[in-house]
Image (tube, helix red, strand yellow):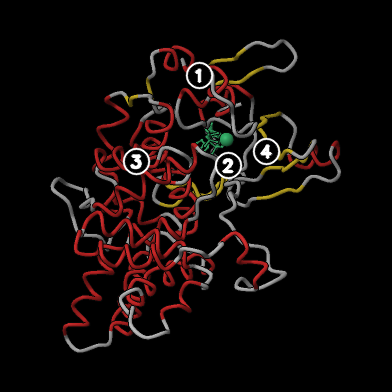
Amino acid sequence: MGGSVRDLLLGKVPKDFDVATSATPEEVQQVFPRCRLIGRRFRLAHVRKAGALIEVATFRAADPTSGDIEKLNGRILRDNVFGSVAEDAVRRDFTINALFLDPVSGEIRDYVGGYKDLTERRLRLIGDPEVRYREDPVRLLRAARFEAKLGVKPDESTEVPIRKMAPLLKDVPPARLFEEVCKLFLTGHGMRSMEALQRFGLSSTLFPGLRKGSGAGKIHLGVVLRKTLENTDERIRNSKPVTPAFLFAALLWQPVSETAGRLAEQGDSDYNAMMKAAEEAISAQAVRTSIPRRFSAVTRQIWVMQTRFKKTRGKRWKRLLHEQRFRAGYDFLLLRAQEDPSLEPLCEFWTKAQEGIDFSRRGAAGAEPRNRPRRRYRRRTQSG
Ligand code: ATP
Ligand code: MG
């Protein structure tokens, strides 16, 4: 339902299938005893079938006035009053996400004009946009994401309130915003997501520590960040892995490099300056989006490596080549050189330094800790 019907109609391959049903999560569990019931704010069942994970949600009631629902200043904290399919449709966010495929008749059920909006490539929030954004401010980001991902354009009533409602993002749990940032930037349309966020004036709320750009709610988009977003999109087109660690290294590089530069001028060692700057930038961002430690640790390593790359005399530089994050740090250096040509000799040095080293055998050579699976960014399903 929702996203999968929409994607099928657009001729895209849905990344997952969400199922909506009149059965309660407990009833779903009776049919699929091994499913998992998840979520508190939005309870649903996770059913595994043939290796695929299917999210099974019970139809929500249209205007729940009692029961298991909880609101704070218009924000929905809990939503577990069950209803009919037609009621469920109007509880969805955008009309194009509210299409249901009836598995028995094979018909598409459209209660909100989503089919027409989809054919006209229009993104329209169901109901009163301000009320709907207040209920769940993540919808602000979802508007940007669907524009970027699907090429749909928000209609005026959906787009106009976004700018002024941006501060509502401050009330969203940072862990949920981290998931949303990953969906925005690590699923193949990162550059377009950034453009949409900028146009909607959402980026400065999402990334509060970054230098402001020209225009309300915008951030300054440096070369490193721009190139990273482009490269990430390219990597996904080529089915290469991507990680939030590198993304955040690029996102926060502007404040990190500026703070580190200032601290070094004031007498800190390069290393200490970088460590302090990293701490500052990561804490400033953590207020808005969490950055799980397994990623922020790597982000830090990428930054610290930038100071270590400068030390090319003596013998110690060779050790760097065999460190786990060398490739990420080196790629980051190359991006920086596109902004700052004075780094080119350094890039050449490190490019030459790698000649004759077979990085594909690094694991076998013991540079990477053995028996530890490399952790990559895993997409987790978000509830509702
Ligand atoms: P994606 O392609 O990213 O999976 P999606 O539309 O399937 O996009 P999901 O987060 O998987 O997004 O949600 C599935 C469906 O649940 C949506 O299509 C929408 O109908 C509904 N939904 C999801 N999040 C919200 C929300 N914040 N408010 C209202 N309805 C939502
Ligand atoms: Mg989905």
Which residue is disc 4 drawn over? 55
Q: Residues within 10 Å of mark 4 (few under 14, many from 20)?
A: many
**Three-letter amino acid code at the position of disc 3:** Met
Among the 4 quarters of the image, the one containing residue 210: bottom left
Q: Is residue 321 depicted above or below 311 in this figure?
A: above
Q: Is residue 281 depicted above or below 164 in this figure?
A: below
Whether label 1 touches label 2, CB < 8 Å: no
Q: Residues within 10 Å of mark 2 (few under 14, many from 20)?
A: few
CA separation, marks 1 and 4? 21 Å
Which residue is disc 2 drawn over? 66
Q: Which residue appears farthest toward the front when viewing the image? A: 356
Residue 8, image x, y percentages: 57, 20
Q: Please indicate whether residue 348 sits to the left or right of residue 66 in the image.
A: left
Residue occupying image coordinates x 27% and y 36%: 161
CA separation, marks 1 and 3? 21 Å
Q: Is mark 4 within 8 Å of ligand 1?
A: yes
Residue 237, image x, y percentages: 49, 36
**Three-letter amino acid code at the position of disc 2:** Ser
Residue in front for this viewpoint, 89 or 203 = 203
CA separation, marks 4 and 2? 25 Å
Residue 55, image x, y percentages: 67, 38
Residue occupying image coordinates x 35% and y 32%: 129
Residue in front for this viewpoint, 62 or 343 = 343
Q: Earlier in the sequence, mark 1 or mark 2?
A: 1
Pair 4/3: label in front? 3
Label of residue 191 in the image: 3
Mark 2 secondary-structure assignment: loop
Which residue is disc 1 drawn over? 10
Figure disc tally:
4
